Amino acid sequence: MSKDTILTFIGTSCPADTVQKAITMAEEANAHLSVVIIAVAPQLYSYGYGIAYGRFVGVENWSEEIKNMTDDINSKSDSVEKMVQEAGISADVVMEFCDVSVLRSAVTSHACLADRVVLLEHSGLPADVLDGVISGVIFDAPSGLIHGQNSDKAAVASKNAFIAWDSSKHCAAAIKSALPLFDSETEVTIAVFDPVRREGEDGEEPGADLASWLSRHDLKVTIEQYPSGGDEIGNCILKRAREKGADLIVMGGYGHMKIRQQLFGGTTETMLEQKELPILIAHK
């Protein structure tokens, strides 16, 4: 019997109950679980400019820091290995103790060989490392990323999906990543905000062509068009998804350059930072 592979990334401080959530997720999805434990080596202190993520330590403390981190990642690997063995599931546990300069490529190499990539709450990943993991998956891997509250449940199945449709290839990639989570009982809402009909692209109305395609997958589909009223689109998505009782938001990410969104804010940053609903996000 074939199995999908669900990949998750954790840090050395990841609590046991989060690991147990990952195990339960794999059991319920009848999937192989791949756990990658990440630790990023500290950089030697210098007077130069800093880097996007990572931390600096003095020369006199560097060796001790490396030894402590090595002990921590080995200990975490042993405890996770024990948990998955006791659970009797199909799983592998890998350690990535890497330099900050190769973090993103290391993440991508694992994500390219997974059917689903899921970031769990309380993963134990420091904020700067988490940013590198998210970037590596979203920008460089073929699969979308499931992230946010109850992401472990969203990675098994969705019964009420909310698609924030903007006719972009990024959103289309996210929808294709989400399809294995849907079945004939799944209710799918295609939400179009401030719709503008483009001749030859949207069928009878914005979202109509997407609805036709999803209907051929035996899904229950409705189209909703919403005015933003000048509110930030990320807030609009959350509000309408809550009203619909959605258990998963599907959307494209970083329609503009990431640096621009980080400087001025944007829908992607809003959705990645919110803690209310799980999202499946892709950028292709």
Image: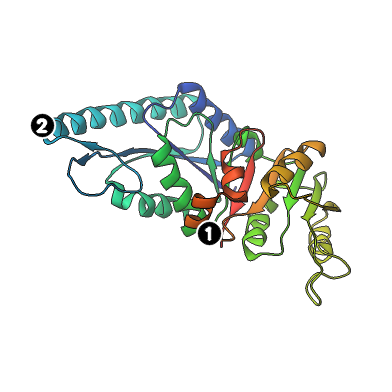
| Residue name at image x 56 percent, y 46 percent | 269
Q: Residues within 10 Å of mark 2 (few under 14, many from 20)?
A: few
Q: Amino acid at mark 1?
A: Pro
The answer to which image quadrant residue 131 occupies is top left
Q: x%, y% of residue 157?
A: 69, 41
Query: Looking at this view, is 147 or 180 the one in front?
Result: 147
> Which quarter of the picture shows residue 143?
bottom right
Apparent side of residue 263 relative to residue 161 in the rendered image (left or right): left
Q: Position of residue 163 (x, y in %)?
A: 73, 51
Image quadrant in which you'd find residue 81: top left
Q: Earlier in the sequence, mark 2 or mark 1?
A: 2
Q: Amino acid at mark 2?
A: Glu
Q: Which residue occupies the foreground of this view, 45 or 104?
A: 45
Local secondary structure at mark 2:
helix
| Pick the front one: 245 or 109 | 245
Q: For the point 78% across and 42% down, which residue is it?
A: 240
**Residue 255 x, y percent position in the rendering:** 59, 60
Q: Nearer the viewer, residue 224 or 23?
A: 224
Q: Which residue is mark 1?
A: 142
Residue that lies at the very extreme toward the bottom in this rendered image? 200
Quadrant showing the C terminus: bottom right
Evaluate whether residue 3 shows in this view.
Answer: no
Q: Relative to 215, say whether 279 is above or below.
A: above
Q: Left or right of 176: which side holds 108?
A: left
Residue 199, relative to residue 230: is it above or below? below
Question: Which disc is residue 60 wearing?
Answer: 2
Q: CA distance from mark 2 to mark 1?
A: 42 Å
